[in-house]
């Protein structure tokens, strides 16, 4: 059986903390998170995903967004490939508290700005200054209200903090449950309800994000896998490609 169509083209932005990808894919992606702000454009085909607003659909010409840490997935509508351009911005490239208005935006000015930036990057005609200016414009066009605080029980925040602080360490479910002062079953249920992922899935996502940062800094793949807490390079490669649609080696070549 043939593998579904999948192709990822990284685009050089010339601006630290800002990355761009063009993806054409018939694959479905399971629930995952990014540690960056993402804003992009569906160029062809249609796309459905889980988001902070529930299930959403994006058609050609629609703009799509994702917040750092937001649990989401993605699948093609109608089984047909879709193509989309995505700009990812580190939190350091975004000033202050920021929230996108919605996960899918039908905004002509936003669409035209994304199309123009995509064309400039794809044609090699964009430098860091242009990307910085256009990123600021995109964020202004896509802005919503400042994020509110979601009330999460302190015991669950404690378990999540352990994962965030030490993703590369050997954190077992027993250790997290002890830190939260509850049994394992209570922790798994409560954690999933509060954060949208199980503790193990959250740990894997944080390790992938740590590996991504290491790769972008030029760390070799095998060393990034070890430093991020993966058993071996192949484990990192499987999870990284499943999450980002690109292998760690290709990511490092494109962005280091």
Image (cartoon, helix red, strand yellow):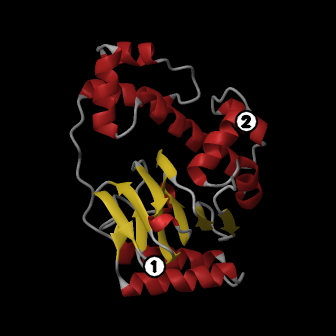
Where disc 2 sits, the SS reads helix
Mark 1 vs mark 2, foreground winner is 1
Q: Which residue is mark 1?
A: 60
Mark 1 lies on a secondary structure that is loop
For image coordinates 68% across by 70% down, the residue present is 11
Residue 99 visible from this viewpoint: no
Picture layout, residue 154 above or below residue 35: above
Residue 144, image quadrant: bottom left
- Residue 78 appears at what percent x and percent y? 46, 67
Which residue sits at x=41%, y=19%? 176
In this view, 118 is above or below 233:
below
Local packing at callout 2 (Cα closer than 10 Å; few below 14, some 14-19, many 20+) is some
Which of the two residues, 137 or 115, is positioned nearer the viewer here?
115
Residue ID for mark 2: 234
**Where is 228 relative to 240, above or below?**
above
Residue 4 lies, in percent from the top left, at 63, 58
Q: Answer with left or right where residue 135 lies relative to residue 214.
A: left
* Horizontal and vertical percent position of residue 5: 65, 63
| Apparent side of residue 163 relative to residue 150 in the rendered image (left or right) | right
Whether pointer 1 and pointer 2 mark residues with C-beta atoms closer than 8 Å, the reply is no
Residue beneath the point at 63% across and 28% down: 229
Is residue 43 visible in the rendered structure shown here?
A: yes
């Amino acid at each position: 059986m043939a593998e579904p169509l999948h192709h990822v083209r990284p685009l050089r932005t010339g601006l630290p903390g800002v990355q761009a990808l063009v993806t054409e894919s018939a694959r479905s992606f399971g629930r995952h998170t990014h540690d960056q702000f993402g804003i992009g454009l569906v160029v062809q085909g249609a796309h459905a995903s889980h988001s902070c607003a529930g299930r959403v659909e994006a058609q050609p010409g629609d703009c799509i967004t994702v917040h750092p840490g937001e649990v989401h997935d993605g699948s093609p509508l109608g089984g047909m490939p879709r193509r989309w351009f995505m700009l990812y911005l580190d939190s350091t490239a975004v000033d202050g508290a920021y929230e996108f208005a919605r996960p899918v935006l039908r905004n002509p000015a936003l669409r035209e700005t994304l199309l123009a930036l995509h064309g400039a990057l794809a044609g090699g005609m964009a430098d860091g200054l242009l990307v910085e200016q256009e990123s600021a414009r995109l964020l202004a066009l896509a802005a919503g209200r400042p994020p509110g605080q979601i009330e999460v029980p302190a015991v669950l925040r404690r378990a999540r903090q352990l994962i965030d602080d030490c993703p590369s360490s050997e954190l077992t479910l027993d250790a997290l449950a002890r830190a939260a002062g509850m049994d394992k079953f209570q922790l798994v249920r409560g954690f999933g309800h509060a954060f949208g992922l199980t503790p193990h899935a959250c740990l894997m996502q944080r390790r992938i994000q740590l590996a991504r940062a290491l790769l972008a800094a030029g760390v070799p793949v095998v060393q990034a896998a070890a430093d991020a807490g993966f058993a071996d390079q192949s484990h990192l490669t499987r999870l990284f490609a499943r999450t980002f649609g690109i292998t760690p080696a290709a990511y490092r070549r494109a962005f280091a």
